[in-house]
Image (cartoon, helix red, strand yellow):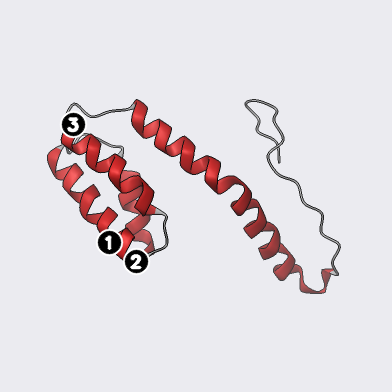
Amino acid sequence: MIDASTGAHVWAERYDRSSDDIFGLQDAIAMSAIGAIAPSLRRAEIERVKRRRSDNLDAYDLVLRAQLDVDSGMPERVRRALVLLERAIELDPAYAQGMPSLAVIMCHS
């Protein structure tokens, strides 16, 4: 996998397996690729949120605080993020940065 914007190598893996379980192989490749790119996606998302700040500093702060909990996979942290994001949207309904994270939580709930 190559980053198209920079040409940098992101991920590569070799699989020497039988094609008898093609779906298992597909799952293994997908999980490996996700594991390789997830940390950089999280960093990029946090940087994107920092660049697009709300005029309401409380809403902005709530979205930043929620970001680390959104994809944690820990139910108590996801619930905490949900509360923070809902409050951010109440404070600034036009601030769109909290909505994608809120949608992710709602889809997985």
- Type of amino acid at the residue the image marks with label 3: Leu
Residue 2 lies left or right of residue 81; in this view the side is right
* Residue at image coords 14%, 44%: 90
At label 2, which amino acid type do we have?
Pro
Q: Residue 75: give x, y in percent of width and height.
A: 34, 66
Secondary element type, mark 2 = helix
Residue where numbered disc 1 is placed: 79
Q: In the rendered view of the protein, which quadrant contains the N terminus? A: top right
**Residue count near mark 3 (Cα–Cα under 10 Å), binned few <14, some 14–19, many ≥20:** few
Q: Amino acid at mark 1?
A: Arg
Asked whether residue 99 appears in the rendered view, the answer is yes
The reply to whether the C-beta atoms of the residues labelled 3 and 2 are less than 8 Å apart is no
- In percent of the image, x 83 and y 68: which residue is there? 19
Q: Position of residue 25 (x, y in %)?
A: 74, 65
Q: Is residue 108 above or below residue 65?
A: below
Residue 9 tag number: none
Query: Where residue 97 appears, x then y in whole percent?
Result: 31, 37
Which label is found at residue 57? 3
CB within 8 Å, label 1 to label 2: yes
Count neighbours of disc 1 (C-alpha within 10 A) and say few if under 14, some if 14 to 19, many if 20 or more.
some
What residue did someone put label 2 on?
A: 75
Give the percent coordinates (x, y) of residue 12.
75, 46
Q: Disc 3 or 2, which lies upstream in sequence?
A: 3
Q: Secondary structure at mark 1?
A: helix
The residue at the point 20 percent across, 34 percent down is 94
